[in-house]
Image (tube, grey):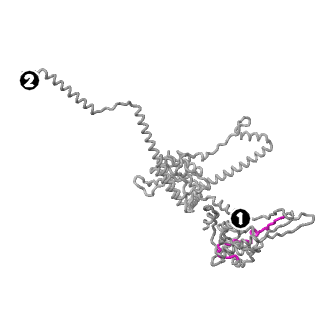
């Protein structure tokens, strides 16, 4: 109903403006209508004080309403705009949201007497004085007098304001109560969730200003922005369907990536698990890959020396694998996060590592905080029990102290030299900063060598980049959508490849036709017929010639 009122109220339907509001019973409607009419007809009182003699006449206007003895509180108002702010307070369990209004002097010329009028608003400090409380979980049918009677057991109540909907006038289930004394408000807050109204426990909180609520909300958002579990690293290396990195990725590799992403999302539902910043997990490894092979591969493509390279294997040995069959994935750990990030962006989805259709899937590893803590405790314990490590740590500590003392002594000596001969010292400092000696000409200050920028390692197959503050967890619906989009792309790529092959074949055939000479067609059947006729004719004439000598004279067919 609230949505229908917000969407349809004051809308134009078939050329007419419509109004949508809650239905009221007859008595309530007549009462509201009568109050509106009386408010329009009631004149506003003006209190005028004249200051005569040699000073200017000033008229102080104090605009008040005669319909009730309760003054409208600028800090706690009951109009429609403030109800939206009070709805925020309900959600955040805070109090008053109105900002403190400063007293204003409104200088206006009076048309009748030409005098100046000063409108001085009353300053309300109930919230600053701690005399206002915010009441929640009220029954919707509770009235002002009933709530006043309940809260008067803690002290004298000056004002009670029930928050209502601006359109319907229905109660929101919350209210503001202003006491005369601060102690009364504190006593009422101590009885929070202990008082009942219509068999319903009410919650009483100290009222707050809108500025205080905004500050608390800002602090809450800042706390949320601190990603203690490093969830933003989940987005690092993601291959989005339709991107340049997904071009050429096989159907099996993309399906495995999406399965791993779903599994990671399920694992991170446990709040004890977090994304490691220095440890990587790599999938899609060949079956014959060992720990040394993994280390050599990392050194070959990245030139970073990992602390740990481990290929996970089955615990039971199998035929041909005495140490256990490889599970197809492993872990790589580094000392610094920058090294791990560079290795991930170099190896992930790289077609030159294992082949175009069998690319490595690299991502940051998910660790269990409890297990990680136990490992750290064991490591610290073993280090403390190791006398060599303790001795080494003491030597490092002494070196640091000696280095610090030497630096302080050098600074002190430099300051003393500067006090004695400032010009010579400044010349030496200038020569050092310019990259040459004191007497040589230099073109300019020598540039310092910058560290390798990790952003420059981004290639066409790297995938998405992670940014702090953006959580990389995607819903299952989006993951399935990515799979469908990638399948559609593979189909289109196959169609394009087929068209390309067909076109190449046509071009090749066309070139062959142009290169060879065109020969006329030979009808073999006709040639055979001609050969047979010729042979028969030749044999006939041969017979005639051979039988000519032996042939008798031809007689006449008639008798003479």
Residue 260, position in %: x, y? 50, 56
Residue at the (71%, 48%) spot, across then down: 407
The magenta stretch spans residue 219: no
Q: Secondary structure at mark 1?
A: helix
What whole-number distance in Å separates the C-alpha atoms at marks 1 and 2? 152 Å
Name the spot of residue 336 as percent of width and height, x first.
Answer: 59, 51
Quadrant (top left, top right, bottom left, bottom right) of the N terminus:
bottom right
The residue positioned 63% from the left and 45% from the top of the image is: 451
On the image, the x and y values in percent for residue 516 come to 39, 31
Q: Secondary structure at mark 2?
A: loop
Q: Which residue is mark 2?
A: 558
Crowd class of label 1 (few under 14; some 14 to 19; many from 20; radius 10 Å): many
Is residue 229 among the parts visible in the rendering?
yes
**Which span is picked out in magenta?**
117-144
Q: Is residue 534 above or below residue 382?
A: above
Q: Which mark is residue 180?
A: none
Do the numbered discs 1 and 2 sit on residues whose CB atoms are within 8 Å? no
User: Which residue occupies the foreground of this view, 386 or 290?
Assistant: 290
First in residue order: circle 1 vs circle 2:
1
Q: In this rendering, is residue 89 above or below 527?
A: below
- Seen in the picture, residue 197 relative to 393 is either above or below; the reply is below
Q: Nearer the viewer, residue 556 or 531?
A: 556
Crowding at dot 2, Cα within 10 Å, few <14 / some 14-19 / many 20+, comes out as few
Q: Which residue is mark 1?
A: 210
Image height of 127 relative to 145, above or below? above
Query: In this orientation, does residue 193 appear?
Result: no
State which quadrant residue 441 falls in: top right
Task: Say whether residue 366 is left or right of residue 435.
Answer: left
């Amino acid at each position: 109903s609230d949505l229908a009122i917000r969407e349809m109220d004051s809308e134009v339907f078939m050329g007419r403006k419509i109004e949508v509001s809650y239905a009221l019973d007859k008595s309530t409607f007549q009462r509201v209508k009568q109050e509106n009419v009386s408010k329009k007809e009631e004149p506003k009182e003006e209190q005028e004080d004249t200051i005569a003699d040699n000073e200017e006449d000033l008229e102080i206007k104090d605009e008040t309403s005669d319909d009730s003895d309760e003054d409208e509180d600028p800090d706690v108002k009951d109009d429609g705009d403030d109800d939206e702010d009070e709805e925020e307070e309900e959600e955040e369990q805070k109090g008053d949201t109105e900002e403190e209004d400063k007293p204003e002097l409104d200088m206006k010329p009076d048309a009748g007497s030409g005098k100046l009028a000063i409108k001085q608003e009353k300053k309300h400090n109930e919230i600053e004085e701690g005399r206002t409380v915010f009441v929640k979980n009220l029954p919707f049918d509770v009235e002002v007098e009933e709530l006043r009677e309940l809260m008067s057991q803690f002290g004298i109540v000056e004002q009670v304001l029930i928050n209502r909907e601006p359109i319907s006038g229905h109660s929101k289930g919350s209210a503001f109560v202003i006491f005369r004394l601060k102690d009364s408000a504190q006593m009422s807050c101590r009885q929070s969730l202990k008082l009942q109204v219509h068999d319903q426990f009410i919650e009483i909180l100290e009222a707050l200003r809108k500025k205080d609520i905004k500050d608390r909300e800002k602090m809450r958002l800042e706390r949320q922005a601190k990603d203690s579990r490093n969830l933003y690293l989940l987005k690092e290396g993601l291959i989005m369907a339709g991107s340049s990195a997904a071009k050429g990725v096989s159907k099996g590799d993309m399906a495995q990536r999406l399965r791993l992403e779903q599994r990671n999302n399920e694992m991170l539902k446990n709040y004890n698990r977090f994304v490691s910043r220095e440890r990587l997990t790599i999938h899609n490894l060949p079956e014959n890959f060992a720990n040394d092979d993994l280390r050599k591969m990392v050194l070959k493509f990245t030139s970073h020396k990992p602390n740990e390279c481990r290929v996970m294997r089955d615990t039971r040995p199998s035929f041909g694998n005495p140490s256990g069959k490889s599970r197809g994935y492993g872990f790589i750990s580094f000392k610094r996060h920058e090294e791990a990030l560079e290795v991930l962006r170099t190896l992930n989805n790289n077609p030159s590592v294992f082949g175009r259709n069998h690319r490595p899937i690299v991502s940051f590893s998910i660790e269990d905080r409890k297990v990680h803590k136990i490992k750290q405790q064991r490591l610290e314990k073993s280090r403390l029990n190791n006398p060599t490590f303790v001795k080494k740590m003491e030597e490092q500590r002494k070196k640091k102290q000696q280095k610090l003392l030497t630096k302080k002594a050098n600074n002190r000596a430099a300051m003393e030299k500067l006090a004695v001969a400032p010009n010579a010292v400044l010349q030496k400092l200038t020569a050092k900063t310019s990259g040459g000696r004191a007497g040589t000409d230099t073109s300019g200050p020598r540039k310092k060598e910058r560290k390798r920028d990790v952003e420059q390692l981004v290639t066409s197959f790297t995938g998405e980049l992670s940014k702090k503050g953006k959580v990389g967890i995607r819903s299952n619906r989006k993951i399935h959508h990515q799979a469908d989009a990638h399948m559609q792309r593979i189909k289109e790529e196959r169609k394009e490849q087929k068209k390309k092959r067909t076109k190449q074949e046509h071009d090749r055939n066309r070139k062959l036709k142009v290169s060879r000479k065109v020969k006329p067609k030979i009808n073999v059947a006709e040639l055979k017929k001609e050969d047979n006729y010729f042979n028969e004719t030749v044999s006939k004439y041969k017979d005639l010639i051979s039988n000519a000598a032996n042939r008798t004279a031809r007689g006449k067919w008639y008798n003479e």
